[in-house]
Amino acid sequence: MRYCKERKRNLFILVRKLSKGAKQFWTGKGWSWAKQEAVTLEERQIIRLLRKRPTG
């Protein structure tokens, strides 16, 4: 999965917010307030990929 620099930066913001326990998630169109259980499948896959490669 390849992302443009801005998309990648947004994903790092997402992961940083997740690690802080924030309830705000990147939907691809913008930020949306949601509970952690409501994270989309795409975001879950991205988070899994970023956990495997924490340096990015």
Image (cartoon, rainbow, N blue to C red):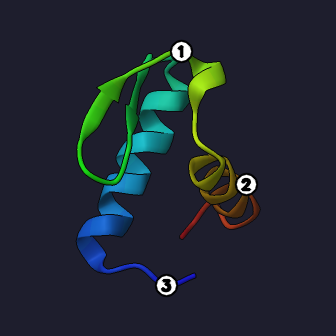
Cα distance between the residues tagged 3 and 2: 15 Å
Apparent side of residue 32 relative to residue 34 in the rendered image (left or right): left
- How crowded pointer 3 is (Cα within 10 Å; few <14, some 14-19, many 20+) is rated as few
Q: Which residue is mark 3?
A: 2
Residue drawn where x is 31% and y is 61% of the image: 9
Residue drawn where x is 44% and y is 16% of the image: 23
Residue drawn where x is 45% and y is 37% of the image: 16
Quadrant of the drawing holding the C terminus: bottom right
Apparent side of residue 44 relative to residue 12 in the rendered image (left or right): right
Q: From the viewer's side, name the closer residue of 51 and 27.
A: 27
Three-letter amino acid code at the position of disc 1: Lys
Three-letter amino acid code at the position of disc 2: Arg
- How crowded pointer 1 is (Cα within 10 Å; few <14, some 14-19, many 20+) is rated as few
Locate residue 4: give its quadrant: bottom left
Cα distance between the residues tagged 3 and 1: 27 Å
Q: Which mark is residue 35?
A: 1
Q: Which residue is mark 2?
A: 48
